[in-house]
Image: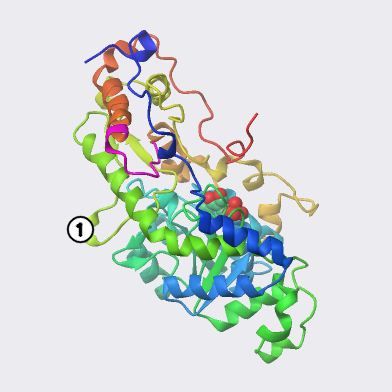
Amino acid sequence: MENLALLGGPRAVQGVAEELFTWPIVTPEIEEATLSVLRSGIISGLQITMEFEREFAEWLGLKYALAHNTGTAAIHGALYGLGVGAGDEIICPSMTYWASCVPAFSLGATVVLADIDPQTLCIDPADLEKRITERTKAVVVVHYAGMPADMDSILEIARRRDIAVLEDASHSHGSLFKGRMTGTMGEVAGFSLMSAKSFPIGEGGMLVTNDREILERSIAFGHYARHGESLTIPDIRAAAGVPWGGYKYRLNQLCSAIGRVQLKLYPDQMAEIDRGMNHFWDLLEGVPGIRPRRPDRKTGTTMGGWYNPLGYYESEKLGGLSITRFCQAVRAEGFEECTPGCNRALHTHPIFQNLDVYGGGKPTILANARPGIDVRPNHESLPVSDTVQSWVFRIPWFKRYIPEDIERFALAFKKVADSFEQLLPDDPGNPANMGNWGTSSLVRP
Ligand SMILES: Cc1ncc(COP(=O)(O)O)c(C=O)c1O
């Protein structure tokens, strides 16, 4: 094995094709669709958006889709659609992006954080069940970083304990859980469609459901412009005209037009990504210290789009080498985005501890909770979310199947794992705070 680049050797990754990572892929059809909206002047209209909704719902085999201007808005609308309100509790994994649950506070509800399963990095069904109380209205299931959650167990618990399931499918467009599309198994789902996601339309979100009441409540909440034609339930229709939440969540039609084209492109793009990612993991099969994060394809479970793909790190197999040092060496080999960890666990943020967001005179997480009960999460009860940063790392997200380039990236990881002993002497260990809140990736200097 050649010397590590960090110690003066040649880089494993050199001269790879730029398009390997280009995303979104902007085709002439996307350009034309966008320009035609611009030329028509109906950027704020609804006609193209409604076509996009109809096609998106059809793709998932569901009755309704309601486009929003962000994924955060779609989740906010979905929570309201489910009837989450004053004094209710929702359960959400601590390991997710904040938008999966923070909007619940503005509805007067509170958030109970649950731990994740180390195999899936999605909510641990046993821990979910332990946290259900008479106030629990819904669980938010996040199919984290492309991998579907264990929906068989979650749905069984939810049905038995009479709570609703909101799927946050922002990382899992097109992923299958035992042959079923993520986003189709709960009462309602929200998808982010912003540019960095595997289904990118610019900026946007989608709520999907088979339930007419959820749909109409979500329309009432943030879509006043369609109160006229879309509200059929008499009690909801009676208060049409002003958005009940005070929010305006309409998606602009430039993004809807892009979305309509993406629906046509996405299956092929997904298949190409899938091929590349599986090739990468096949090449690293059996390399000590690195365990693939990929679903069991034999069950029909897949990672649609492979959003934000991760690998598992086994420090004990590499003489205790810290993940920080490991990633530093991989970056030196030429994969500059190799960082330890993933989203920072929510329970470590002040909003889930002591922040008084709405001036209620006490922490918001308690202001909306059962009197006398402290629902604030603690580290001890969330051991997997609390430590995950030290045993997962970022791998390349290949958008194209270019085997010879993918092999260079696999070599970078293999080289570092095989030469771990050379890295032990200057290992700084892991810093206290790893992972991120998802704030920096879009700001380029
Ligand atoms: C799990 C998850 N849920 C929701 C969202 C919110 O989506 P958006 O950024 O489109 O508001 C994101 C966005 O990154 C996410 O990662």
Q: Nearer the viewer, residue 40 or 319?
A: 40
The chosen color scheme is rainbow
Q: Secondary structure at mark 1?
A: helix
Q: Quadrant of residue 297?
A: bottom left
Q: Position of residue 107 (x, y in %)?
A: 69, 64
Q: Residue at x 37, y 44 (%)?
A: 400
Q: Does 43 lie within the magenta span?
A: no
Magenta stretch, overall SS: loop
* Quadrant where the C terminus is found in the figure: top right
Determine whether 313 is above or below 324 in the image: below
Residue 369 as seen in the image, left or right of residue 183: right
The answer to whether residue 374 is seen in the rendering is: no
Q: Quadrant of residue 254?
A: bottom right
Q: Does 398 lie within the magenta span?
A: yes
Q: Position of residue 25 (x, y in %)?
A: 48, 48
In magenta, the rendered stretch is 396-405
Determine whether 212 is above or below 374 in the image: below
The answer to whether residue 53 is seen in the rendering is: yes
* Quadrant where the N terminus is found in the figure: top left
Determine whether 325 is above or below 313 in the image: above
Q: Position of residue 318 (x, y in %)?
A: 27, 22
Would you name the residue on which mark 1 appears?
Answer: 298
Q: Nearer the viewer, residue 289 or 222?
A: 222
Q: Position of residue 156 (x, y in %)?
A: 36, 71
Residue type, mark 1 in image: Lys
Q: Residue at x 25, y 42 (%)?
A: 279
Q: Nearer the viewer, residue 365 or 176?
A: 176
Residue 123 as seen in the image, left or right of residue 276: right
